[in-house]
Image (tube, grey):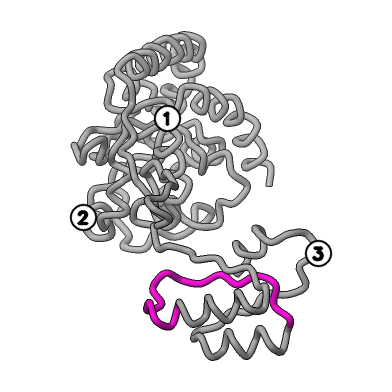
Amino acid sequence: KERIRELCPEGTDSILLLTCSEQCVQAIEEHKIQDIFLSSQMNGEELYTLLAFCRDRQVAFHIVPYLQPLFTEKVELSSINGIPLVSFKEQTIEVVENWLRRGVDLVLSVLFLLITAPFTLCMALLIKLDSQGPVFFRQTRIGKDGAPFTIYKFRTMYTDAPVFHNSPSESTDSRITRAGRFLRKTSLDELPQFLNVLEGTMSLVGPRPEMEFIVKNVYNDLYRQRLRVKPGITGIWQISADRTREIHEDISYDLFYIANRSLLLDMLILIRTVPALFMMKTH
């Protein structure tokens, strides 16, 4: 309902959600409805009857097709002999753009790793002094086309920490080390993922890499659209103001990115990542 309200002209008084054509007719008569949006799942005869009713009363008539599973495709509107068509064209990413994106990934990752090398050494020493175990944490994630790969992070937990089925909040999680709490709060535990970018399993921008059990138990055909491109360190979800749900619970940002993927969009996301990260950590 709120998404429909955003599409309405300024000054719209109210929005009614109706479940059948009889309710629509009654609402049009009683509330002087100006626009009506209908699901394409309504049967043809009922749809035509309501269309004729709206035409006689000069009510704007809109049909909303159910196209969410095809959200990542390019949509073209056309008609043949007056018959409206919604056409889908598979988005083809040019080879040249792929090579350019890979070049940008390599150059920026090398520069970033060189600039942060002293800090990385300090973090490695801090992790070693704080608790026993390796500096890096390695875990299998799912990447492009469903291929598994090893993701790198700074270790933030004790090596003998028990595995919780439902992880507690970070503020009360006894598995997290003192150094790890700082790294997580500042998102610095993600820095080693630039090594993933160098080896080609990740990109700077893209959907976040998902864990194996989530892909296996949660993903359907729509969710698997996230696997069409390389996972990234940052993305639209990270720079958005609405991060109230887990990434795998709201994939609309990732689907939008895949459908509109370009080098320019990548640059805009990278530019906005730093201030977005700062704002997220200060609230």
Amino acid type at circle 3 is Gly
Q: Position of residue 17 (x, y in %)?
A: 58, 79
Spatial CA distance of label 1 from label 2 is: 33 Å
Q: Which residues are magenta?
A: 32-47
Quick one: label 2 or label 3, which is nearer the N terminus? 3
- Asked whether 152 falls inside the magenta stretch, the response is no
Q: Residue 219's quadrant in the figure?
A: bottom left
Spatial CA distance of label 1 from label 3 is: 57 Å
Query: At numbered mark 1, what does the secondary structure look like: helix, strand or loop?
Result: helix
Q: Residue at x 58, y 84 (%)?
A: 24
Q: Is residue 60 above or below residue 253?
A: below
Quick one: label 1 or label 2, which is nearer the N terminus? 1
* Circle 3 Cα neighbour tier, 10 Å, few/some/many (<14 / 14–19 / ≥20): few
Q: Nearer the viewer, residue 245 or 26?
A: 26
Q: Residue at x 47, y 9 (%)?
A: 111
Q: Is residue 133 above or below residue 176?
A: above
Q: Label 1 belongs to which residue?
A: 127
Q: Label 2 belongs to which residue?
A: 216
Q: Label 3 belongs to which residue?
A: 11
Q: Is residue 65 above or below residue 253?
A: below
Query: At numbered mark 2, what does the secondary structure look like: helix, strand or loop?
Result: helix
